[in-house]
Each structure stands twice: as structure tokens, then as C-alpha cells.
Image (cartoon, coloured by chain):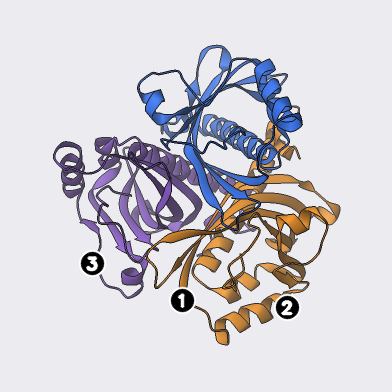
Chain colours: A purple, B blue, C orange
Amino acid sequence: MIPVDRNPAKTREARLDALLLHQEVDNFNAAYAAALDEQRLTDWAEMFTEDAFYIVISRENADRGLPVGLIYCDSKRMIYDRAFALEKTTMFAPRYLRHIIGNLQILGEVANGAIRARANYVLIQVLHDRPEAKLHQVGVYHDVFRRIDGALKLAERRCIYDSLLVDNALCLPV
Amino acid sequence: MIPVDRNPAKTREARLDALLLHQEVDNFNAAYAAALDEQRLTDWAEMFTEDAFYIVISRENADRGLPVGLIYCDSKRMIYDRAFALEKTTMFAPRYLRHIIGNLQILGEVANGAIRARANYVLIQVLHDRPEAKLHQVGVYHDVFRRIDGALKLAERRCIYDSLLVDNALCLPV
Amino acid sequence: MIPVDRNPAKTREARLDALLLHQEVDNFNAAYAAALDEQRLTDWAEMFTEDAFYIVISRENADRGLPVGLIYCDSKRMIYDRAFALEKTTMFAPRYLRHIIGNLQILGEVANGAIRARANYVLIQVLHDRPEAKLHQVGVYHDVFRRIDGALKLAERRCIYDSLLVDNALCLPV
């Protein structure tokens, strides 16, 4: 769980490289949040690798190793299907969403140069017929990034949310 | 919408420069939030250029191109007037405010070295006569920064908030 | 209150050094939040120096110079005692906590290479028997870091929270 660039024995060059990687993932997460906040779901789907794994699962189920999640996709095709369905066919109450992604940690490299990371997220929702902003979901992303043609993509994003129940109305990815 | 430093073809030097700029804007936003959180409104006004444009406007109106906002200032003089009025003359219920500014994206340079950026914000309020912290406003800053005598200043900050209604009591800038 | 790396006269090398330090503190805070969010309280206690000072105090009392806080520890032993008591002996309603730490500012070096910093925090709580996530506490960390065997440790963390009252149930550190 120790972030890679806290090792004091590393050279300055290695620490700057770690910093560049941290910034690159941070930028990725900011762009990810912007795509969802602006409901550009096709752009969102484009941020995953072909074989990406994407789930939204309760902390309770994740802690017990239970696989059942609110959303489960094991390929970019499934992610696209969901984006397409939401954009073109699903009926749901109009709302605004706003992500804050913070506390990013780069946890290290795994096989083949893939990068493990985690970050906390807060998702705030405003329904169009209600004046108040509400905490919709809070949790943590457990991620694996891979580089495709030079750009980072999500090979895995597990969104583990703290709330035990979620509004029936949840239909958008986080 | 792609942040400038995600281009894999860029040299390491260019990526480090992008990182320094990102950090500089991030520091600016942290200082901006601290000035408002500590109600140092003159310090806040000092963070803008002479010809600065500052508005607080609903996402609904911004999306439709309607110009009407909660706050509208088209010069630093107007921003100072507001700061002065709030500090010296306005009556409002005492409260604490706390900003979290996250998801910063540097979107690129525009004419004359000015820098376009965006960031999400959450503003949390505690009224002195109520125990609970509440989400007061969430939204996005659309910014243009210019460098004056070496230091960044805001030439433009559009605060676009998600909530459809805002408490009558809103009187402080965001 | 001006962050150290906003000085335009500094060399590029000095600005990169400031960036590395900023990142190191940011990583520290992310690891600190993760330790508390995952209720690894012994890991949390390990992040302080032997002579560390840790308090959780209301903004009202802090502003008036009153020392009374919700939590007061003036050594790592006291911090460990609290961690041990919470993990082994205290009864409290099960809950999930999630920290977002943002707006980090490195304020400069004090005596002996110690580093002053501040950051805003939001603590969101989900009680296991209630579905909704709630804002539990918001505030600011006023910190002093020292380097012990190369790694940053907290020599001082003053958690100053905005809310005027805090749930009786508060028993975990922030």
C-alpha cells in the first residue's frame, strides 16, 4: 500500500518519473469525471481497454468476496452497450452529477507495465425537480491502467461504494 | 478537452513544464479557497486581473446561453466593490464555508499565453446556529488565467453550479 | 500564506524540488486517509513522530485560542493508546468512513527542516443501519511534518472542524 514515490532512496530522476505518472493518472481521472459529469458516455466508454473489467459493487459485498454488483461489465463491448442504452433508450429522471476524485495513490506496477492505483470518489447529484444537492455515492476506485498506443486506458476499475443501499434510480456509471 | 500533458509524443522536459504549470494552478486554487474559507475577501479580490470577468451562474442558464447569474462582475473594481460590501456593510447570518476544489484540468493555452483550465468545486456550509454541515453548492469553474508580473491571476472565472435553486441567503462568492 | 513554489524568481530546479515535496505530502495524506478509511488504526498511529501533537478541535475554539478539543494527544504513546482502545475495547455503532483531503498547500519550512502545510478535509460517514451517506465533519488540517529516517511523519496535526456540534457518536480520529 506504500505509494512508489515515497521511497527516499530513489534518485531524483526516478522521483520525477513517478511524479509524471501520478500526474498522468490524475489527469485521466479528471477527464473521466468530466465525461460522466457532462454525460458524454461514449467518451467515457472509450477510456477503457477492449478487455476491460468494470464493476460497481458495495463495500459490504466486496469485503466478503461476493461478486454481485450494481453494474458488471467484463469487456468494452458491454461498457459501450451500457453507454448506448443510457444515451438512447433508457428513461430516467433528469439530473446533474458531479464527481470529485481525490486521494490518488499509485500503488505500483504489475505484470506487463500495467499500473495499479486507487482513489476516493464522491458523487453528488442534483435532481432537476429538487433544489438540493445530495451525496449520491461515496467510495473508492481500485484500478489497473494499461498503456495503449501511448495513452492510459482502464483495464480494470472496481468502484466500491460505502452506502449500503442505493436509490432505485441509479442508472448511470460512476 | 484533452489535457495538454497527456500527449505521449511530448518530451520529458515538456511534460515536466506542463506539470509545473498544473501545480501552479493547483496552488492558486488552494490559496483561492483558503481566502474565501477564511473570509479574507480583499485577498480574494486581489487574485483577479484588472479586466477580470467573474460570474456565478446556474448550469441550466449556462447550457442555454442565458447570461443571468447570481453574481456578475466584469472588472476587478466590481469584484472589490462586492468584497467591500460583504465585509463592511452587508448583514447575513454568520456561517463557516469550506471549499474543496478538485479534478483540475489544464485545457491549453489561448491567445497571449493565457491558460484555460477547469476544476470541480464543492462548497460546504455550516450555519452558526445549526449543527450540521450542508452541501451549499457544487459545480465547475471554467477559467482563464493570465500571468501578471510573473504571478498567475484570474482573467475569467465562470462558476457554473449544478443546483437549480440556491438559498436566498447566498451572498458570498464561490 | 503564499505557497512556496509560486515565487516566479525561483529556478526551474527549485520549482521541481518544491513539486516533489508537494507530491510527497499529498501521497502522505492519501495514505493517511486510506489508513483511517480502512480502520487500520495502528498504521495510522505509525504515521506520527514520537513527540507528535494531535488534536481535533472546533473552529470556534481554535479561533478564540481555547485549547479544549474532542481529541487531544501530545505524544505518539497517547495516539497509540487511542488507536488500541478503539480497535480492542470501545463499543460503537458500525460505520464506514471516507476521507477526501484536498487543497493542499505547502506553507514553507520551519526550524530544523520541518515543513508546515495545510489541507481541507471532508469526512463522510455511512452508518451500517442507515442507507444514506452523510457529511460527518469538514475542516482543515494545520500540519507540521518532519522527516524521520527519510520518510515524512506528522509532528503536529491540528484538525479544526467547522461544525459547531459533533454527533455524540464521534469516536474515531479524523
Query: Which disc is residue B174 wearing?
Result: none
Q: Are marks 1 and 2 in contact (CB under 8 Å)?
A: no
Q: Which residue is mark 2?
A: C78
The residue at 70%/46% (across/down) is: C106
Instruction: Identify the residue at the far left of this view.
Output: A89
Residue type highlighted by circle 3: Val
Residue C145, how many percent across, how many down? 73, 58
Return the disc, 1 or 2, that comes first in the chain's sequence: 2
Residue shown at the point (60%, 76%) measured from the top left: C42
Which disc is residue C94 wearing? 1
Q: Which residue is mark 3?
A: A68
Q: Amino acid at mark 1?
A: Pro
* Label 1, label 2: how far apart the Cα atoms are: 24 Å
Chain to which the residue tagged by mark 3 belongs? A
Front: mark 1 or 2: 1
Question: What residue is at 66 percent from the left and 22 percent from the top?
Answer: B79
The answer to whether residue C149 is visible is: no
Work out whether residue B73 or residue C107 is closer to the camera in this orientation and state it: B73
**Residue A164 located left or right of residue C146:** left
Chain holding disc 2: C
Task: Between residue A72 and residue A107, name the one nearer to us.
Answer: A72
Residue B25 appears at what percent x and percent y?
A: 59, 32
Residue type marked 2: Met
How packed is label 1: few (under 14 Cα within 10 Å), some, or many (20 or more)?
few
Check chain identity for marks 3 and 1: say if they share one. Answer: no
* Secondary structure of the residue carrying numbered label 1: loop
Please report, as a chain letter, where disc 1 is located.
C
